[in-house]
Amino acid sequence: MADRKGHIVILVENLPVPFDRRVWMESTALTQAGYKVSVISPCPPDDPQPDKVIDGIHVYRFPMYEEKPGKLYYIKEFAYCLREVGKRVKQIWNEDPFDVIHTCNPPDTFWWIARKYKKHGVKFVFDHHDLCPELYESKFKRQDIMWKGLRWLEKKQFQTADAVIATNESYKEVAMSRGSKRDEDVVVVRSGPKLDLFQPVEPEPELKRGRKNMGVYLGVMGKQDGVDYALRAIRYAVDNGLTDTSFTFVGKGDAFDSLQEEAEELGLFEDELVHFTGRVSDLDLRRYLSSADFGIAPDPNDPLNNLCTMNKIIEYMAMGLPIVSFDLKESRFSAQEAAVYIPDNNEQAMGQAFIDLLADPVKREQMSDFGRRRVAEGLSWDQSQAVLIDFYNRLLGNAAAEEVVADSRRCA
């Protein structure tokens, strides 16, 4: 492809593509802007064809590491993925040399691969998705030698990077303080929904399973995501007067089975009060969100979550859902008046908020309208992809050409 702007290789370890929504939106946006994009990621176990071209994007995938209990699991997983990704980076380099290695974390280990290619003039971009030290601290409640090791790896990632893509201003602050990056070397590219994909469809009352109202949770179901808080909040709400309301949990994760066991213990499967869908298609997701009356964001306030922009928050807003959320710094920035905020990870207060919100349809409508406007005016992927493309045009020296084209169009 002689007229392409450059070749970008994107590395992702924790989710397969195209299921990693942010990575896939970045990949398609850059492809549409004239860049060649190759992505290396894990391969879903049910996909017999790991390497393929999807929507013009060259995808190279390796077998997912089998999760096993034990303290050394993460070290073994990181070593395995570093080896598998490194082999595929070399394969791509031999087939068609690239201009940029764009790494998404976790883990913060792919700087080790980038060192070799930087000697050939390849740029290294760190797309900072997760604060790995805070993730470890939030999950295991300690700052031990593993935590110190994660801080060291994060430091090396920042030091090796020519530029950093941060998901919000809190992450940009980390890049500049802990990573010692200059302001001009860090760009904020928020994770927001594509507006054309998050348009409400006709509500389907049957999805509420015979009830008037429905609350919905959307997202990953890991230990740190707080879905267990939501389950206990539902139990409290039902025991304290909430009636005629069902709850649907959309998504999956490593806590999926244990959460269903907890729901069973809490008696939430009686009369289909709670339903777990697992992963669903984009169309089914819109059906559930369009039929719900409010969204639940139970991510507890901890060192990681407080600084993260939760995709579910923006997606609820795009679909016009009022939100009940624990009180997190970045959730407040995103949702503002579209959410009710619960302090101190108080699940009983969250349950009471379910009751109060459903009793106030006027407030729900106001929150819904505010959320839609806020997403449309600045939090959608439509705005973020423009920032991403501008960043890459400048990084690879394509900005001047873009300005010439824009000037010619203005004169036409």
Image (cartoon, rainbow, N blue to C red):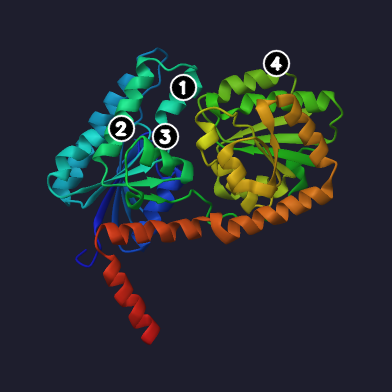
For mark 3, give the secondary structure: loop
User: According to the image, label 2 marks what residue?
Assistant: 155
Q: Are marks 1 and 3 in contact (CB under 8 Å)?
A: no
Tell me residue 273's x, y (percent). Answer: 76, 30
Q: Nearer the viewer, mark 1 or mark 3?
A: 1
Question: Label 4 amino acid?
Answer: Glu
Tell me residue 188's x, y (percent). Answer: 43, 50
The label number, if any, that marks residue 265 in the structure image = 4
Spatial CA distance of label 4 from label 1 is 28 Å
Describe residue 118's horizontal placement relative to residue 9 as left or right.
Answer: left
Residue drawn at point x = 77 percent, y = 53 percent: 365
Tell me residue 165's x, y (percent). Answer: 37, 47
For mark 4, give the secondary structure: helix
Q: Residues within 10 Å of mark 3 (few under 14, many from 20)?
A: few
Q: Residues within 10 Å of mark 2 (few under 14, many from 20)?
A: some
The label number, if any, that marks residue 46 in the structure image = 3
**Lower position in the chain sequence, tag 3 or tag 2:** 3
The part of the image, by quadrant, that contains residue 270 is top right
User: According to the image, label 1 marks what residue?
Assistant: 137
Spatial CA distance of label 1 from label 2 is 17 Å
Q: Are marks 1 and 2 in contact (CB under 8 Å)?
A: no
- Residue 54, above or below 303: below
Q: Residues within 10 Å of mark 4 (few under 14, many from 20)?
A: few
Spatial CA distance of label 4 from label 3 is 31 Å
For mark 1, give the secondary structure: helix
Q: Is residue 106 at least partly visible in the picture? A: yes
Describe residue 340's horizontal placement relative to residue 399 as left or right.
Answer: right
For mark 2, give the secondary structure: helix
- Residue 143, above or below 225: above
The label number, if any, that marks residue 246 in the structure image = none
Name the quadrant of the C terminus. bottom left
